[in-house]
Amino acid sequence: MQKHHSSIAPDTAVPSPAGYDKHLQVYPVKEKDSTRKPVKPRPFLFRFRSARTFIFWTAATGLFTSTFVHSILFPLSPFIVSRIKNGDDINQQATYDITEESISTSRDTGILVALYAVGLLSGSPFFGWLGDKIKQRRIPMLLGILASIAANIMFMFSTMYWMLLVARFLQGVSNACVWTMCLCLIADNYPSDQLGLQMGKLVGFYPLGMMVGLPSGGVLYSKLGYQAPFIASMIFCVIDLLMRLIIIERSTAPREWFMQDDEVEDVMNDTCSSLHEDLKLKITWFQLIKQPRLIVSLLLTVVVATVMSGFEPTLSMRLASEWHFDAAACGLILIAYMVPSIISSAVCGWLCDKFGTKIVAIVSLVLAIPACIAMGIPTHETSFWPLIPMLAMGGITIAGCQSPVFPEIARAVAAENKSSNDRDGLARSYALFNAAYGTGMCLGPFMAGFIYGSIGFFWLCVTLSTMFVGCIPLVFIYLGDKGHLIKRKQSSTEGNDNSKITVSHSLSSFHSSHSVVA
């Protein structure tokens, strides 16, 4: 018996390592820690590279870059196609050659635009599967930015039409990766009660990229030459690539690197990580798409994408036909829509965290109906000035319709997982969001172009607004807290408890911290 006690005494007298917390003894990973190899020293600029602020800006830069690269081609596509078909060098005269063969150029340009949506829809399932298969987001994000760089190089030096098609397809695949992994990166590193605000701010970089990319493409093309827009895109891609290379993800870094900063949270983080070391896919695609709240969220995404992509070409044609605006003036007018949309994304995300997704979505849908109809009222007989506040209202309300989608997708994933620490299906759910958005981008221009040419811009606005009407009952029934229009605010004690146990895999802990919602 004495020998037995002497064999235990040295173990209990071992001095605590640096950063040791007494709470560790309650976790089952203690035995594993006793055999763990010495931890490597912290990397250079560790605090900066692993900070949530830097992680957010990495995701935001990726989203902005992908949108900028995508939107910069909108005003250039007809001229690029015309250059390829005519075999001419790029010069200012090429901009006037398009009208001579507008039908053929329009058809080829439409195919070029459609290839982007095909790439988006094709890449989304793969990156959704990959995002759930591996824990590290950096590797897929690097693949995405490399595809974007390859697409830019092909656009710069293309001499055949098929090269343009391949480049546009690669851009779609790249954006599928960026959207899926950027959303997952934010979900991995922020508490569940902050996701609405953080996702809202992140998605605000989409209209920001459009606002910068649309006018930049025309200006760079006309002033500096054909390759200038793609050189600008490459600069943003290189910055994005560097940020993705130096980022440090908490889900893959050693626990001890974080314990000195935030012991309780990161001990839980390591526990979750250890549980996922042998991650096996349990949630299937069918299990995800049978969730009513996920289906409604995807439907809302299709509607928002259809309306936005429907207005993009037709609004410019409306401004040109009614008030004789040129391309530069149309770009300036669109700022009235995009700036409020950027602000509304963050504000509505914060409102989703505070009051719930149901009330934010319903109010936004109700207000979006008259806002869309009102945009079709001003004509050349009045003035374009009344259109400015209507565009601003449209930007605010449409962004408000999109903001509740991201926390709702997270709750749908949490409902399918049995464990509160399991995040399986998260990347695939955002891949479904990508596919829904790409579907809306395909439907919008075709539908809007047909309606605009047949019955006019006003009735196009009326038609698009009816899509919001159809979403209201579904949102009321399936989104947010069942039976409650407004989410009840948690007590301060409950909120403190949640803040202690929320970790980098916070999206997957919705089931435990928001059990009423799930």
Image (cartoon, rainbow, N blue to C red):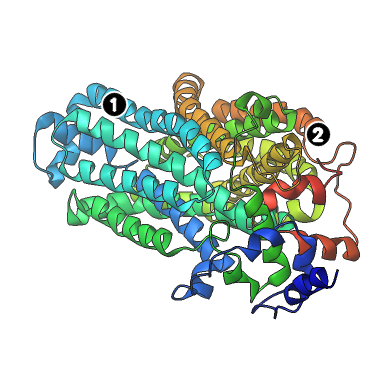
Label 2: how many Cα within 10 Å (few below 14, some 14–19, many 20+): some
Q: Residue at x 59, y 42 (%)?
A: 279
Comparing labels 1 and 2, the label whose residue is closer to the camera: 2
Decide which of 437, 458 is in the foreground and name it.
437
Quarter of the image with the N terminus in it: bottom right
Secondary element at image label 1: helix
Secondary element at image label 2: helix
Q: Position of residue 247 (x, y in %)?
A: 46, 63
Separation (CA) of disc 1 from disc 2? 42 Å
Residue holding disc 2: 476
Q: Position of residue 340 (x, y in %)?
A: 58, 55
Q: Earlier in the sequence, mark 1 or mark 2?
A: 1
Residue holding disc 1: 106
Q: How many marks?
A: 2
Q: Answer whether labels 1 and 2 touch (C-beta < 8 Å).
A: no
Q: Is residue 354 above or below residue 128?
A: below
Q: Residue at x 73, y 68 (%)?
A: 264
Quarter of the image with the C terminus in it: top right
Single out the residue that lies furthest toward the left: 88
Single out the residue that lies furthest toward the top: 454
**Direction from residue 378 to residue 87 in the image, left or right:** left
Q: Residue at x 68, y 56 (%)?
A: 271
Decide which of 489, 261 is in the foreground and name it.
261
Residue 320 in sight from this viewpoint? no
Q: Is residue 506 above or below residue 309?
A: below
Amino acid at pointer 2: Phe
Q: Position of residue 375 (x, y in %)?
A: 58, 39
Amino acid at pointer 1: Ser
Q: Is residue 393 above or below residue 475?
A: below
Q: Which quadrant of the structure image shows residue 90?
A: top left
